[in-house]
Image (cartoon, helix red, strand yellow):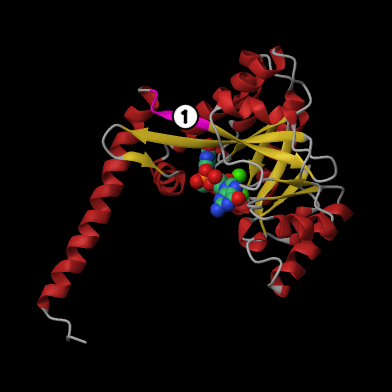
Amino acid sequence: AKPAGPGSYLLFDNAMTQQVMRRLNIHNELHRALDNGELQLFYQPQVCARTGALKGFEALLRWQHPRLGWVSPAEFIPIAEDSGIIVRIGEWVMRTAATQAAAWVAMGHSDFRMAVNLSVRQFAGSKLPSVVERVLQETGLAPHILELEVTESMALQSVASTLSTLHACKALGVKLSMDDFGTGYSSLAYLKRYPLNALKIDQSFVRNITQDTGDAAITRAIVAMAHSFGMSVIAEGVETKAQLAFLRELGCEEFQGYLFSRPVPAPEAIKCFAGYTDA
Ligand code: C2E
Ligand code: CA
Ligand code: CA
Ligand code: CA
């Protein structure tokens, strides 16, 4: 191999500069994106393990920038979190998803949930319950249809304030689930005190579940723990029938993943209400 010369430092610098520039670019463009209607929600179905019936949707952000093209939420959400604009975006997501859900209710669908992702930043302070309350009022959505997906990192706040925010949301009648469970470092001691309806098993455990005995063991333990706390389990990132069979055997109640559907725009998502009888 050629020894690294001065040129390689230059290349490295350029790559770094480009990365910083792109971040800055995305940061600057996000405000405009929100006001210009460039953000959209796609919806991914969550399916009953027993019957194949539709149980709910997860709303996922999509951004099509006129020049940058599609920007992945995995890239822009962290930037939005750093800059704080995630709080405005998060409120837009909640209102848009609730409006969509209310429209589906008006069309005669009532037995489903609409889950939205919450950033840790939306947990800071004590505003969240009043935002949720306002969105429910404005959209007229029955509270039990709305579900908030929280993550273990919300506990960066004091335990007392995390608990009081969760209980205040719960008191409004919305559902709560813990996203990406097992990937962060949450204290199991607190888990039982969180008023959660469901735990979501992260895709990283599902991916190799049929071969990796460690992942299978972790998933089995999460399912057992969830059930002993009266929570149900949703497995994410289910792509194959083999994963499906395995997760069903472990006692997961619901599945979400490409095997059923990718996240799709609302007009397509509405077809999911028919369920998945061949699964
Ligand atoms: P997440 O909440 O864990 O969402 C699941 C991700 O897995 C989504 O990626 C989804 O499209 C993808 N996925 C679903 N099924 C499959 C599958 O079978 N195989 C594979 N390979 N992937 C699958 P997406 O939409 O790119 O979102 C990435 C992350 O961005 C989300 O992870 C979430 O953390 C964040 N995000 C997305 N929308 C929002 C939002 O409205 N608010 C906040 N705060 N975060 C959001
Ligand atoms: Ca999620
Ligand atoms: Ca997840
Ligand atoms: Ca994730």
With 228 as the anchor, is 142 left or right in this view? Answer: left
> At label 1, which amino acid type do we have?
Gln
Residue 179 image offset from top left, x and y in percent: 65, 49
What residue is pinned by disc 1? 40
Q: Residue at x 60, y 19 (%)?
A: 99
State the image quarter where residue 3 is shown. bottom left
| 243 and 130: which is toward the camera | 243
Q: Is residue 39 magenta?
A: yes
- Using the image, determine if residue 86 lies above or below residue 270: below
- The magenta span reads 37-41
Q: Is residue 49 magenta?
A: no
Q: Residue at x 85, y 44 (%)?
A: 50
Query: Split into 4 quadrants, where in the image is the N terminus?
Result: bottom left
| 245 and 36: which is toward the camera | 245
Residue 167 makes an appearance in the image? yes
Task: Identify the residue at the far left of this view.
Answer: 6
Residue 196 makes an appearance in the image? no
Q: Residues within 10 Å of mark 1 (few under 14, many from 20)?
A: some
Q: Residue at x 77, y 21 (%)?
A: 110
Q: Residue at x 61, y 29 (%)?
A: 269
Residue 15 image offset from top left, x and y in percent: 22, 61
Query: Split into 4 quadrants, where in the image is the C terminus?
Result: top right
Q: Identify the element where label 1 is drawn.
A: strand
- Using the image, determine if residue 206 lies above or below residue 72: below
- Ligand 2 found in image quarter: top right
| Main secondary structure of the magenta stretch | strand
Residue 150 image offset from top left, x and y in percent: 64, 44
With 260 as the anchor, is 12 left or right in this view? Answer: left
